[in-house]
Amino acid sequence: MTLAHYLTVAALLFLIGLFGVLTRRNVIGILMSIELMFNAANVNLAAFDRFLHPEGVAGTTLALLIITVAAAEVVVGLALLMAIHRNLGTAYVEDFNLLKG
Amino acid sequence: MIEHAYLLPLIAFFASLVMLFAGKEDPRSPLPWLGIGAMTACLTIAVSIFWSAAFGGGVLPYERNWRWFSLAASIGGKSFIVDMSVGTLIDGPAAVTLVVVTLVSLMVQIYSVVYMHGDTRFKRYFAFVSFFTAAMLGLVVSSSLLVTFACWELMGLSSYLLIGFWFEREGPCEAQKKAFMTTKLGDSGLYLALLLIYAKVGSFQLSQIQQFFDNGFMPATVATVIAVGILVGAAGKSAQAPLFIWLPDAMEGPTPGSALIHAATMVAAGILLVSKTYFVFLASPSAMEAAGWMGLITAFLAASMALVSFDIKRVLAFSTVSQLGFMMCALGVGGFTSGLFHLTTHAFFKALLFLGAGSVIHAVHTNDLRRMGGLSKKMPLTFLTMLIAVLAISGVPGLSGYYSKDLILADVWNHDHAMFWILLFTALMTAFYMFRLFFLAFWGDDRDHEKFSHAHESPVLITGPLVILAVFSALAGAGLDHDGLVSKLLAKPTISVMPGATAAAVAVPVDGAKAETAGHEARGESSGRGERHESHLPPWLHMTAITLVLCSITLSFFMYRGPTYALADAVKANLAPICTLLERRWYFDDFFYGLVALADQAAALAFWIDANVVDRVFVDGWGLLMLIFARISDAFDNIFVDSAVDGVGSLGNDLGVGLRSLVKEGQVQEYLMYAAISFSLAATLILTR
Amino acid sequence: MLEHIVFYSLSTLVLVCAIGVVTMRNTVHSALCLGLCLAGLAGLFASLGADFLFAAQVMVYVSGIAVLIIFTVMLLGRASDLHLRQVNDQWMAALLICAVSSEGLLKIARFFSGTLATTAAKPATRDIGRLFLGEWMIPFELVSLVLMAALLGAIFFSRSEASR
């Protein structure tokens, strides 16, 4: 298995996530797509660590940091979603247009 | 103390600052005593410097420098390091001058406490005087021409301030403007000389410049230009012809201030500057000759003008100009020692004369000699001290003026006989007009009874300085002349003559007499005597001169002893044209006013040409042409350019409206998509290059 | 050989589940797909020899975030959602963007097509611990600060209006 395989998988995962972010109408769907993109980045980091710098653990460690931040992001995002849902009664982003000019 | 000479200007400057800014203005302010105390300290330092220079083992000149700033410059690929220094340079003349300046300043300040009493700007006057003294001391002790120039200008400023001290009146205002403008005219010459010196030598330090000249590096023509520049500056400050016109008017200021600045010290600064840069003149015989003749003409003209003036301060002012001419003439003919000696003695007796005149004015409240008379009975002390001063300035043997004037006449005699006779005649005039003043003021009957009855002897704070100055006026000449002290302290600087082209340039004779003198100097220096020993008149001439002076005094006595002035009136009637000429000051003022008027008319003419020719043809015509072009351009702009601009604008507008119908606003994901589009395009472009 | 089988099967699982996440009409199905996808990714980490990352992925993502999301979906979901389109009308543009971006990303991947692992994978947990408590102390602390802020933010936003 070469590095290219892993990078390809990560790239495809990232693009799928991007597609989801751009197209999902539901906020939860968007959040999930974002998680996919985070994980694509993590795969990249772990793969680079394994193939290019096997002597160190910096990539893995960075991936751990990303996991932490992602967890925090999901928690805050879901909390916000709850608040918005409570106020607007909807979870669809096209209805979030209070700032529309 | 000589290593702490820098303290002198600093103390005075500090005192002036304190007096100017501390405390409130009050006619009974105690602050002037601070200035007097500071001046006493300065006098102590100055005397100790003088003592060590004259009698102690002090080695002169003493130089001490501090670095001011350094500049590294690179011009045309060459790098330079410019070091600017400030410091003190004490030589013999400086040591003598320091004592003179501090002593006269102290006397004047003590005197002024009474004289200026009750004035609304009492404190400020003393601040100005201290400020002036600081500048003068700075000029004397400075080792750098740049600092000297700065002090020179500061003196000009304080002179301006003191002349216009009573600026509510019109006369002082006019006088201060006249003085400032005239001296500035001279200062510009000095400034050019400084620039030229720096350009050539690369330093403002006097010692380095002197070395430069000593080594003969300076071309004679450049030296002449520099010397002329310095001479112009000195002519402005020391009121030499034709720039002396400001000094008589400068008497509008307070009398003690005039005594200090416009009689004893500041006007001597020009002479002092010439003596400080004497090596320049030694390198340029033609400039020396010019200085000599300038001094001679000034001395003669001013003395003649003093003959007819009836304003006591004006007479003294003309006398000052005349005496300064004596000094300049002495320097010009190579009499360095005699010129500076006269500067010293003159400072004492002229300050005394002015303070005495101030005392008289204080008593009778008028400047007009015709309204005084017989004051000897009322003011015995003033009368006696004035007598000493008048005798001293007239050159009566035994008093200080005699020694210095004798030396000057001797130097001139050795230089040029024609100059000597003119100068002797001027000296006779000096004796005549000084005694005319003296007799008119103190002798005869009281011509104005009201003034006379109010007259009284001045208080001790005025007479005290008079007496002290009288002592110095009487004894300074003999004291300095004793045991060759003057020739030791005021030794003429030498300039070594290099063989070759520069030597020829230095020794180029202007005329036969000059060549002889130059040769003589060279011999004198080679034998190591330093001082020219032939500075004595032939005995017969000496006796003749003294006799003539005494005759002149006698003539003055018979003409002006009173109570009737028939003889004087007869002389005046017979010589009416000459009197008018003298009263109009040889038309010098008219000449300058005419010059200004002429310039005014020229300016008016230029304005007319400007308004009617230049403006009409060029400005207006050009404007018309431009207007036509502008019209064409405007039409073009409106029709073609604006349409294009509007077209672009409306195109953008249409495009925007069209695009807007395509997008929905306020959609997060739409914005996100634009971001993603730009991101993907950028990433793809960068990565697949 | 085994390595290839593992990689390809895991990759297929991950990508298929990811496609499921973004395309499923039912959000609950989406969320379940996400959980499976994250589990597959954990397997990929294991095949890369990143043992600690594997553990973290399983614990944080699979058992934490995925469950949290499913929980929220069930909390907010409504029956009417099942009949609504879950993909908006810019999917064509999004697809185009993805196609364009793939050009650059896959070029990077192709660049490393010859890179093989030179050493055997080794346990890294000890090294990660040393790094966190040594050289990377400050990022570590900052991350804990972020977590704290997230905690506070979550509490603040999810409280009901009345209790604020």
Image (tube, coloured by chain):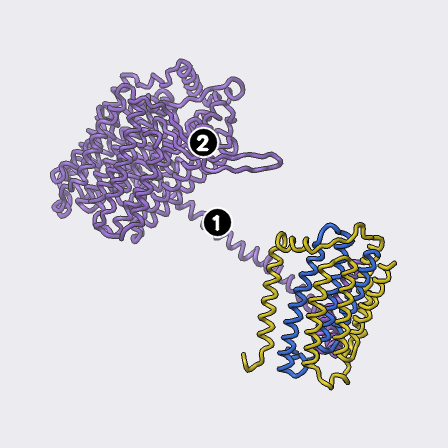
Chain colours: A blue, B purple, C yellow
**Disc 1 residue type (three-letter):** Ala
Q: Are marks 1 and 2 on the same chain?
A: yes
Q: Relative to the observer, which residue lies in front, C81 or B676?
A: C81
Residue B110's x, y, as percent?
22, 40
Residue B194's x, y, as percent?
47, 35
Q: Residue furthest top?
A: B527
Residue depicted at x 71% and y 51% = A56
Image quarter for residue C141? Answer: bottom right
Up-down: is B301 above or below B220? below
Which disc is residue A47 wearing? none
**Disc 2 residue type (three-letter):** Gln
Up-down: is B236 above or below C55? above
Residue C104's x, y, as percent?
80, 61
Please state, as top left, top right, bottom left or bottom right, where the C terminus of chain B lies in the image: bottom right
Q: Earlier in the sequence, mark 1 or mark 2?
A: 2
Which disc is residue B602 wearing? 1
Please state, as top left, top right, bottom left or bottom right, where the N terminus of chain B lies in the image: top left
Q: Relative to the observer, which residue lies in front, B514 or B135?
A: B135
Q: Relative to the observer, which residue lies in front, C47 or B475?
A: C47
Up-down: is B631 above or below B541? below
Chain on which label 1 sits: B
Residue B40's x, y, as percent?
25, 36
Q: Which residue is mark 2?
A: B205
Residue depicted at x 71% and y 84% = C78
Image quarter for residue B425? Answer: top left
Helix, strand or loop at label 2? It is: loop
* Marks 1,2: beta carbons within 8 A: no
